[in-house]
Amino acid sequence: MFDISWINPGGGSISKESLQRENSMLKRQIQELLTLDETGFFIELDSLLKAILKKALVLCKAESSFFSLSGKDPAELDVRISNLILEEKMVKIRQQFKLEYVRWQESEAEMITIEDFILLPLVRRHRMLGVIGLRLTPDAPDNICEILPILAAQAAASLESAILYERMFKRLLVLSNVFILGKEIVSNIELQPLVEKFLSIACDGTDSDVACIFLVYEKDDQPYYSYLKSTDSSLKFAEGCPNGYTSLIRSVREDEKHRIINELAGSEFSQSEAGKVAGIVLRDTLVLPLKPRDRLLGVIQVANKRGNFSYRPEDLDLLKILGSQVAFVIQNADLFKNLQRAYIDSLSALTSAIDAKDSYTRGHSERVTELSIKLAVDYGIAADEVEKIKLGGLLHDIGKIGIHEGILNKPGRLDDQEFEIIKSHPDLGVRIMGKVEFLESIVPIIKFHHERYDGKGYPSGLSGEDIPLLARIVSVVDTFDAMTTDRPYRKAMTVEAALAEIERCAGSQFDPAIAAHFVSMVKRENEQTQA
């Protein structure tokens, strides 16, 4: 224990004048603490901590000090600032404080002595906000025993205000971002970028290292898609989610309320795969159901509260706001997907009608689509680009709706004039699809799938890699299907003969790399089928 008997060692009485003088000095010293720089106070909590510690050092004539903020476990000293303290000394103080903290709770003493330090618990409304540690010198004021409690009380009041202000300021900033994002929702139906922004706000607003959303099938609560944002990894999207989440999701659904778990260690949740997300071990978590209009869409979750703090009611309030908006976004995205699906179904019916105009090409669009997707995936094309091929392959000949059936079904070869009319179908297709905003991305496939690698194709005479990649892929498959299908003027070629023709035309009509890959893929599939 720290001996402060050196203060007023002679004992005895103190004159009234001396006492008044000391009291006046004490009031003046404490007033200095009241006039901390408000700019530092309101803008940054660390600035306040430094200012208080600096004043305390001067006021108490201390030679070393530290400032700790209380977190989830108040007995753990979370030192934010320290002056002239060796790490070994700080380790001893931390260890001893854990023991002294229990005794302090029982006694509610104004100070704790550990080693040669005096520790001042900063208590406000029966809650310890932090601890100031001071190593005094023999030069400390004679009235140090009066100064320390007042110092602690004033520091606690300032600290409480700063913490509340910081939370309020941060929450206003977060809500401002939520409002801005809310306006963006109205004009944006792309789910992925909106979810990324929501999860960034969730991480920042709740001071969490991890935020994630899991979407579930309504019939059995099985997660089918997940979105993850963490401070040490980029946003991740994945099919399904970690094992063990189904039970958690069901418990949230059945309770129809949130779950706050501020200590996962040793819990059933932490023992399952649900206690980890993308390899990140979860320490604590806040989970909220996404359940608009009695339909469970999934859950939104934040985890690993920063700074050793616990999740608070205001974190839940923010997550509820974000959850309601995320649910709205997901519902809008589902609605938009349904509209897209209905539109595409209508277009599929239209392409079937186009194929029906030419009795020899019935099913051509579906075959080109299926094989183009296979080639694109095998070639290593990104998933979002494959989606374009899925639509582009289906609609690549949409312009033929404007071509007379007599030309499409002519039994002999086309004359020059008729061929020019046929060559107009890519531009006709662009005129049709160019008016549909969400199909703009597939226009290059429709327009350029008849271009040649040597520049002798149509409609624009592009060559080489100036031809869009997806159009080059569809071009190979389109030609292959045409060669292996009966036409009015010839019988279908065998697969082997068609592949040989594609190899022969690689570098002239086709992209040589894509042509070679296609031939290899088809041969490999044929071998597997025959095996």
Image (cartoon, helix red, strand yellow):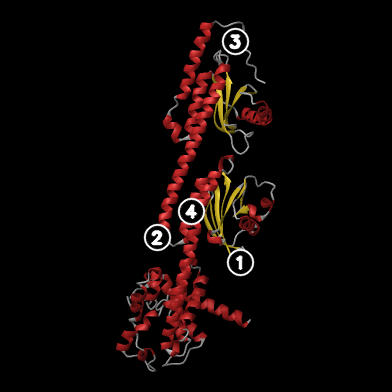
Circle 2 sits on which residue?
A: 187
Q: Residue 310, image x and y in percent?
A: 59, 42
Disc 2, disc 4: CB below 8 Å?
no
Q: Secondary structure at mark 4?
A: helix
Mark 4, Cα crowd under 10 Å, few <14 / some 14-19 / many 20+, is many
Question: What is the quadrant of residue 252 in the picture?
Answer: bottom right
Q: Could you tell me which residue is drawn at 38 percent across and 88 percent down?
A: 408
Q: Earlier in the sequence, mark 2 or mark 1?
A: 2
Residue type at mark 2: give it: Ser
Q: Amino acid at mark 1?
A: Lys
What number is the disc on residue 219? 1
Residue bearing the label numbered 3 = 8
Q: Amino acid at mark 3?
A: Asn
Distance between the Cα atoms at labels 2 and 4? 16 Å
**Residue at the outermost bottom position:** 411
Does dot 3 land on a helix, a strand or a loop? loop
The residue lying toward the viewer, choosing from 202 and 389, is 202
Could you tell me the amino acid type at mark 4?
Answer: Phe
Distance CA(mark 2)–CA(mark 1): 31 Å
- How far is mark 4 from mark 1, CA to CA? 26 Å
Q: Secondary structure at mark 1?
A: loop
Q: Earlier in the sequence, mark 2 or mark 4?
A: 2
Local crowd size for mark 2, using a 10 Å CA cut-off: few (<14), some (14–19), many (≥20): few
Quadrant for the N terminus, please: top right
Q: Residue at x 59, y 5 (%)?
A: 13
Q: Is residue 16 above or below residue 45?
A: above
Asked if residue 71 lies left or right of residue 399, the reply is right
Q: Which residue position holds label 4?
A: 198
Q: Residue at x 61, y 5 (%)?
A: 12
Is residue 530 something that shows in the picture?
yes
Q: Nearer the viewer, mark 1 or mark 3?
A: 1
